[in-house]
Amino acid sequence: MQVPLIRLQCGANSYDWGKKGQSSAAAKFAAATPADGFTVQDEKPYAELWMGTHPSNPSKDVRTQRTLLDLVQDNQALMGTEISEKFGHKLPFLFKVLSIGKALSIQAHPNKKLAEQLHAKDSKNYPDDNHKPEMTIAITPFDGLCGFRPLAEISHFFSSVQALKKLVGEKEVEEFQAAIKGKETSEKTEDEETNKKALQKVFGALMNSKKEDVEKASKELIVEAEKEGQDFAGGGGPSNEGQELADLVVRLDKQFPGDIGLFVLFFLNYVKLEVGEAMFLKADDIHAYLSGDIIECMAASDNVVRAGFTPKFKDVDTLISMLTYSYAPISEQKMDPVDYPYVTLNATAYSSGSAATLYDPPIEEFSVVKTDLKKKGAKATFEQIAGPSIFICTSGNGKISVGPTSEEVKPGYVYFVGATAEVVLESEDTDFTTFKAFCEL
Ligand SMILES: NNC(=O)[C@@H](O)[C@H](O)[C@H](O)COP(=O)(O)O
Ligand SMILES: [Zn+2]
């Protein structure tokens, strides 16, 4: 039986923080596939291209206009019966392109148990009952806030950023610094527990500041940042990023004047990803993406608990109570991609040093392979897998073939490939880049 190769029509969400018009990769990629009435408007923000079966923005088969959700529910072989049954006859992952023009919300995504509770209590703001661990791969330079910093860095900022110390409260800061003193890097369980409790207490003190106090403190923070430059925040702590932090605070204040997020920034790792670099966020990890175009893959959910940098619904108490309060340098969140072994590259490909790179997070719902073919005629043949795949091309022209069926591929083209298909990608260009999200148990 011929495994189908299905061209998908995918929708773009216009959240406030998206890049505008044609500058948005999400908009350009959505417009690459005909969709009745979709045209890119210059002044409109386009934040996310969604590829998958999530009901909030379901992808469709271009030819039949049926949703991918319908197709995989009608034919369990498309996902492979085992995966189809395990994940309730819908794709286990949601695959996205994000084009970030300004900061996303200070957010975290609930674990499975909390997601079920939030969805049952408030299905409008929590649209499904699933967890949402997620992985980010930079397709342009990216920066973001991700995970709590090492405690000594947070303590350093309490001592060196006057506006922060004043807003949180001298007593709360001193209590925190006393609680962690001498234990900041202890690996003893009881010390880690004490540290996490102290971090939750002082973070809660910040998050429960009065709005008028935050607005007043943010004005003082900007004055401090602009006056001190490289010496700001005590020279920026161990990574000596004083000027960079000062610039970041000023940049974010322009996007969200007087926002609590300006102070959360000192609790979180400031991370930069170069093209091809990636990071993984477990459920309940606090983060806020700030700029760049990324490929994002996540368990199939749209549950976001927000607390700052957003006009959307905020749920501060839930965020404070759900976080893991694990703290670590960003190196522990960055991923180490490896060569993907289940692909054969033809001689042309080897001569051009192309590669298939696997980003494999520690969860079962998805992995992603990036394939870079840098020469006309370069070919990558993917062995069959017992699960579903979605391919998207982010640059260059080429072809995708499954059995006797061959289709053209251009930037923004998205294809669903059913289980047990061998897939051949062939470049017609000097830089044909695709990303494949897939699930196999
Ligand atoms: N970290 N990235 C994500 O979680 C994306 O998949 C989410 O869709 C966005 O974070 C949603 O952000 P807003 O709620 O609009 O601020
Ligand atoms: Zn997120």
Image (tube, rainbow, N blue to C red):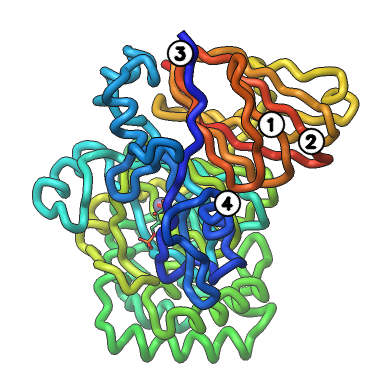
* Amino acid type for the residue under numbered disc 1: Lys
Q: 78 or 178, which is in the foreground?
A: 78
Which label's residue is closer to the chain start, 3 or 2? 3
Marks 3 and 1, how far apart at CA: 23 Å
Q: Which residue is mark 1?
A: 399
**What residue does disc 2 label?**
428
Q: For the residues marked 1 and 2, what is the alpha-carbon distance in whole angstroms?
A: 8 Å
Q: Which residue is mark 4?
A: 32
The residue under the point 26% across, 39% down is 130
Residue 386 is marked as 3
At horizontal 45% and vertical 75% (from top left) the residue drawn is: 262
Q: Position of residue 148 (x, y in %)?
A: 44, 54
- Counting from the top left corner in percent of width and height, residue 178 is at 37, 61
Which of the two labelled residues, at mark 1 and mark 2, occupies the earlier sequence position?
A: 1
Q: Quadrant of residue 353?
A: top right
Q: Compare residues 236 and 246 and report the one nearer the observer.
A: 246
Calculate the distance from the C-alpha at mark 3 to the C-alpha at mark 2. Answer: 29 Å
Picture coordinates of residue 73 (x, y %)?
Answer: 27, 25
Q: Are marks 1 and 2 in contact (CB under 8 Å)?
A: yes
Cα separation, mark 1 vs mark 4, equals 15 Å
Residue 284 in percent (x, y) is at: 33, 46
Residue 282 visible in this rendered orientation of the protein: no
Q: Along the polypeptide, which appears first: circle 3 or circle 1?
A: 3
Left of 102 or right of it: where is 441?
left
Q: Is residue 69 left or right of residue 346?
A: left
Q: Mark 4 and 2 residues: CB-CB less than 8 Å, in contact?
A: no
Q: Is residue 167 above or below residue 145?
A: below
**Circle 2: residue type:** Glu
Residue 104's disc is: none
Q: Closer to the N terminus: mark 4 or mark 2?
A: 4
Q: Name the secondary structure under disc 1.
A: strand
